[in-house]
Amino acid sequence: MRLAIVAMLALAVPAAAAPHKKPHKPSKPAKLTKEQKEADRLFKNGVALFDAQKFSEALAEFQRAYDVSPAAIVLYNIAECHREMSHYGEAVAYYQRFLTEGPGKVPAVRLSAAKTELDGILAHTAHVTVNMTPADGQLIVDGTTIDPPIPSPLILAPGEHKLTAHVDGKQDATKTVRVASGDEPVIELVPTVPPPPKPVEPASTVATSGTEAGTTVGPAASSSRFVRVHLAAGYGTNVMAATKTGAPAVGLGIDLGSRVEIGVDGTLVAYSVIPSIRVRLAGDRFSVHLIGAVPIVYESAGMTSETFFAAAGGFGFRLRVTPAIGLHLEGLASFATGGHGTTFPAFIGGDVWF
């Protein structure tokens, strides 16, 4: 089913459209019932408040008077209050009710005046047709829910207005329109089924992809789990001869996944190049690594030089200060043939990931 609603967005009606300024005061019957006496009291209060331009208070009195003892003329006074407060939708509805119920009950001149005032409002309106699906949804205009049955047409002040269709279990359909008198736009409002919530990544998965080289810390890890490059710089020395050895060291690493890193390190004075592989054994922000390396050493002695290879293995410790910056401490045992024996190189430094 589809519900068609016509909303008229009105300018204030010129004074010429309302030649009288006070609500109608009907003649009082010779004998009043108890209900009529109470309605008469409320009606008189409403007239006094209307004359004092307290239209909201007057409206409350007129509405109670009509509830106690319905009289067609009271509908006219209610319409007048709504009109003075720029409640154009309510004013049109009560004018129309008065024109429907009033014939034969109120003077024809009053009916004619009401028709003139109603036409004055309608002459300064824009007609907005709202097609809302489903028809049993709620229509909300500028934050106010229109009580069912939704009147047709709706009358609102001109300018910008927010129209919303609400249906339980669906996502609201909202459109904002700006209209002037004479406009006749058609607005479609169809609430939709909301999309399913996105799955939340388990905490264990986030921890696994945490701070090891090749990942970032936290949820962003999934976007950079596979390949990442980092640079290292520090200082290396032979632990067994720390007072006689030592040189700056630099390195380039490529992280493959969250646990494995291959790279190459070099010392700038001892002229060695160290291809290596590191495997994370445990930890995230502070982690422990198993290191395997094949040092290539270039030694110079006078006019001659010697190159030899060694095999090295050991452990390293890494602290990730931020997802892109870390500190490391590594110790190795290196075994070489040809009389070069065993050494115990150690490195300390920092890492930067890109």
Image (tube, rainbow, N blue to C red):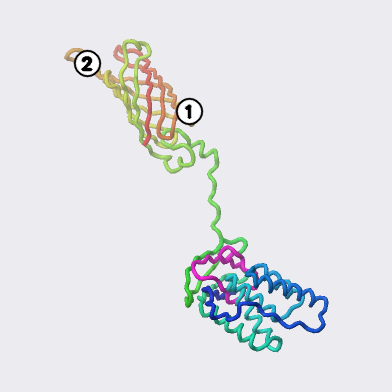
Quick check: 226 left or right of 103? left
Q: Quadrant of the N terminus?
A: bottom right
Name the residue that disc number 2 marks. 300
Magenta includes 119? no
**Residue 148 image position (x, y, % from top left):** 65, 71
Does residue 150 belong to the magenta stretch? yes
Q: Quadrant of residue 40?
A: bottom right
Relative to 337, is 97 on the left or the right?
right
Residue 100 seen = yes
> Which percent across, then down, holds residue 151?
61, 75
Secondary element at image label 2: strand
For residue 247, above or below residue 15: above
Per the rendering, the mark at residue 286 is 1
| In the foreground, 287 or 296 | 287
The structure residue drawn at horizontal position 47% and vertical position 68%, both measured from the top left corner, is 178
Q: Quadrant of residue 23?
A: bottom right
In the image, which is nearer the foreground, mark 1 or mark 2?
Answer: 1
Amino acid type, label 1: Phe
In the image, residue 82 above or below residue 314: below
**Mark 1 crowdedness (10 Å alpha carbons): few <14, some 14-19, many ≥20:** some
Residue type at mark 2 is: Ser
Tell me where the magenta segment starts and ends, as one range: 137-166
**Sooner in the amino-acid sequence: mark 1 or mark 2:** 1
Q: Position of residue 70 (x, y in %)?
A: 74, 78
Residue 180, placed above or below residue 294: below
